[in-house]
Image (spheres, coloured by chain):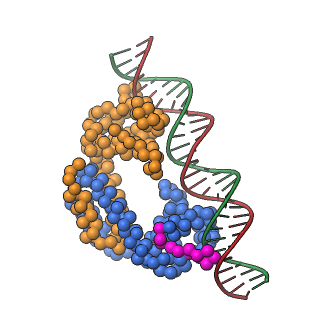
Chain colours: A blue, B orange, C red, D green
Amino acid sequence: MININYRDRRPIFEQVKDGFRNLIISGVLKEGERMPSVRDLASQLAINPNTIQRAYRELEIDGYICTVPGKGSFVSQRDEAAEKRRAELRAKMSEIAREFRHAGLGEEELISLIRKEYDHDSD
Amino acid sequence: MININYRDRRPIFEQVKDGFRNLIISGVLKEGERMPSVRDLASQLAINPNTIQRAYRELEIDGYICTVPGKGSFVSQRDEAAEKRRAELRAKMSEIAREFRHAGLGEEELISLIRKEYDHDSD
DNA sequence: TAACTGTACTAACTCAGTTAATACAGTTAA
DNA sequence: TTAACTGTATTAACTGAGTTAGTACAGTTA
């Protein structure tokens, strides 16, 4: 469900967080669905429960999940989560576009790169 | 010439490296021009010379500068550096486009974001 | 010669991330 | 009620990347 890459520069808790964020936004984890328990996931991934806890805490702060002490963590409304993610992506994209322009690359090339991604077979 | 932001998640040596890379690619530092000496820049930025040395070492490995022991470091051919940077940006852009698509955002919106960046007054 | 240049190396420090262990409180089902 | 689950909290210790400090050596230049 979630993969950890130890060569990745990002900390583990962030990889876990991003992994679930993608699963939620893409709809693999559906609204209201139960998340794996902190202890279960920790032993599955062979990492410390505290690390999972941190990922979950931030996912809740960002509105992706909703945790209930004693019961578990649950995926919250997908729409909110997705909209939040879209806002992040828009900001990221604007920044890259600025860099692109700054590096002397043309608008046309950038757009053709994008079309290439969107022309791929759906996955 | 170079600014360091201590709130930035990236390490200092990387901020220095990126700063010079931008200066070189944008043409502010011209081909053959001398870079500030390791010790000078270190005292200017109030950081350790070793940190600057590391940034310079990587800039040389990446082909942005050319260092001569005893003489100093010099900006190398801009074309190579710029081409290298462009390749990096293309890869980065493809990745973001993939994420964009994955998040359910349309090609049109992405392209309009880009046009917005390119329509800004030149800086 | 003196003052600059880059380079190399070692030791120590800092800090974020992580682990380990333990404890507490709410939930659920037998 | 008890047992086994849930999330949460806290403290101490470890790890590794990044950074600092200090020193040393060799090439360059005026």
In percent of the image, x 27 and y 50: which residue is there? A103
Instruction: State whether residue A9 is above or below residue A30.
Output: above
Relative to A23, is A45 on the left or the right? right
Relative to A6, is B109 on the left or the right? left
Instruction: State whether residue B64 is above or below residue A110.
Output: above
Question: Is residue A44 in sight in this rendering?
Answer: no
Instruction: State whether residue B1 is above or below residue A21.
Output: above
Q: Nearer the viewer, residue A108 or A78?
A: A78
Q: How many marks?
A: 0
Question: Is residue A61 in sight in this rendering?
Answer: yes
Q: Which residues are magenta?
A: A62-73
> Quarter-wise, where is residue C1 in the image?
top left
Residue B68, how many percent across, how many down? Answer: 37, 30
Residue B111, how many percent across, how many down? Answer: 25, 66
Residue A123, how many percent across, how many down? Answer: 38, 75
> Quarter-wise, where is residue B114 in the image?
bottom left
Instruction: State whether residue A120 is above or below residue B123.
Output: below
Confirm whether the magenta stretch covers residue A121.
no
Residue B44, how many percent across, how many down? Answer: 41, 33
In percent of the image, x 25 and y 70: which residue is there? B108
In percent of the image, x 46 and y 49: which residue is there? B7
In percent of the image, x 34 and y 53: which residue is there? B88
> Quarter-wise, where is residue B2 in the image?
top left
Q: Nearer the viewer, residue B28 or A121?
A: B28
Q: Nearer the viewer, residue A59 or D3?
A: A59
